[in-house]
Amino acid sequence: MKARLSPVVVALLWASALLWIFPLAGALLVSLRTLDDLTLRGFWSWPKEITLANYVRAWAEAGVSRYLLNSFIITLPSLLGILVLSSMAAYALVRFRFRLALPIFLLFLGFNMVPFQMLMLPVFRLANQLGVYDTYLAPILFHTAFQLGFATFVLRNFMRTIPASLFESAVVDGAGEWTIWRRIALPLMLPGLAAIATLEFTWIFNDFLWALVLLSRDELKPITTGLANLRGQYISDWPLIVAGSLLATLPTLLVFFGLQRYFIQGLTLGATKG
Amino acid sequence: MLRRPSPVPFLWLPLALYALWVVYPTLATFALAFSDWDGVSPRWNWVGLENFARLFRDPVFYQALGNNLVWAVVFLLLPTSAGLALAYLLNHPVPGERFLKVSFYLPLVLSPAVVAVVWSWIYHPQQGLINALLAAVLKGLAALGFQVDPEAAYRIGWLGDPRLALAAILGAACWRQVGYVMLLYLAGLKTLDPEVVEAALVDGATGWTLFRRIVFPLLGPITVIVVVVSTVDSLRSFDLVYVMTRGGPFHSSEVLANYMYLSAFHDYRMGYAAAIAVVLFAITFVPIAFFLGRAVKEEG
């Protein structure tokens, strides 16, 4: 198993890896050159100058800074809501013995796997009826609710590994349920919460469809739908569009490299999520 | 004195939100599929099975369904085998292992919407990366004396040609998917019992035999997950198609999710779109039922 690979295989692995990052490397190169330079002299020419001008324009003039801010305004409250509510639900489903515990668990698990197309039209209508359509609140409420299924499922399985005697001794010491949830259950669920937070951050930050369905004003758009907008505006100015795309990936890349361990752990947990 | 503690204070809010935004909409789509709602008017009429009758006569629906199936077959063959091979090889000591792994799963961190925009550039006929690469290759061939025109490369419209559009989108989709499959298998390989593998090595199993007879069967549970995830992902693919081609040209890269979105928000045929969603749900129901059944069994 741990035998060394032949040098040919290692060389092939390296070649494939370079091929795999070639699109991003090429994108980076193009984003650092001016449109004139590229149109006149072609992709394979030596750049006349390396410039950050495309990034500056994408950030300020094309609205990438605004779009990114919107992404955070939508993602962070959703994330907080998911973590608090799912840890409450998971606590309730494991801590208390009641007949509906299993059906409720299966409700969370089952509807979490329903394809998003099944929700799209009624969610659009509901957002209109509640008067939140085209406000930040619409995607925040929806993401919080929709991700509860997955998060509750993962956290409940985490909670089950905590011995019940821990909770009982806290009851004997006179602690109320909210205290037990906050002081005992939450700290013990921390690894699960971290994995969920990393994964959900990426999912919500990268969401395109719900932003498309629930938001129409340009000043509210997150980076995903904003980028599509920007592409329509700067039709053939690819260096600028590519620079904007690379800026758009920065937050998720930072989270990913900072919390890689949790991200990978979460992905394995999340494999069954649709 | 001892009051029975109640789960209600912890459960009511998560459950209410879930019921309002997830459970109710899922059920409401079934009702919408039998209506002629246009997305704007406050009222609608029941039209019975009319949406479904029209859907099953709609050539675009079959085009989209066929493309979804092509997507699923490609996803099950290419990224799955490539991801498995990479995971197996990278589970050995390799110089630069970390760099190699990161290169393969980096695309996974990017939003599909961003991937779609970047690949729209890559496929651009005059300014894109692929045609620049092809032109360089053709130039090399021309220099060697072959009768080729390097400029011909710049005339290939990857996303504009109905024969190429779906394949081009699938290229971008596979680029992102390989790292995901690799990560799942790498996690699976870590849980393998090294003693089993060592026993096989002692018995003289090497290379391909070791992989095929011992390692791959032991990875069975991961393979089930990969197959289910790839199938379900293929059936709901949306972002790449919507951003790169909107299903065009002439519906050649149409998929069900995109057709549904356009029916609902461009043609204002919400009932028709809901019928597409119901058909999609029916197709994905098998893997969902499979997972739920397994969950119930695990709970005993």
Image (cartoon, coloured by chain):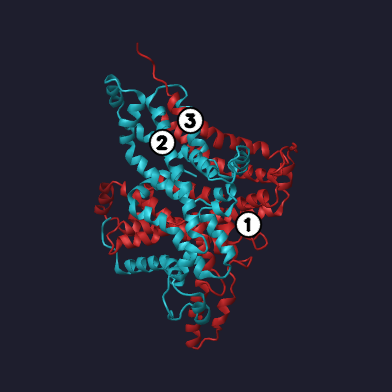
Q: Which residue bears the numbered disc 3?
A: B13
Q: Secondary structure at mark 1?
A: loop
In this view, the residue farthest toward the top is B1
A122 displayed left or right of B189: right
Is the C-beta separation of discs 3 and 2 under 8 Å?
Answer: no
B91 displayed left or right of B229: left
Q: Which residue bears the numbered disc 2?
A: A84
Residue B38's disc number: none
Which residue type carries mark 1?
A: Glu
Where is the C terminus of chain B found, in terms of image quarters? top left
Residue B81 shows in this picture: no
Where is the N terminus of chain B found, in terms of image quarters? top left
Is the C-beta separation of discs 1 and 2 under 8 Å?
Answer: no
Which residue type carries mark 2?
A: Val
Q: Secondary structure at mark 3?
A: helix
Return the chain for callout 3. B
Q: CA distance from mark 1 to mark 2?
A: 40 Å
Q: Judge depth for marks 3 and 1 and give the one in front.
A: 3
Return the chain for callout 2. A
Q: Judge depth for marks 1 and 2 and give the one in front.
A: 2
Which residue type carries mark 3?
A: Leu
Q: Are marks 3 and 2 on the same chain?
A: no
Q: Secondary structure at mark 2?
A: helix
Chain painted red: B
Chain painted cyan: A
Q: Residue at x 59, y 45 (%)?
A: A117
Q: Residue at x 43, y 50 (%)?
A: A202
The answer to which of A13 and A72 lies nearer the viewer is A72
Q: Which residue bears the numbered disc 1?
A: B254
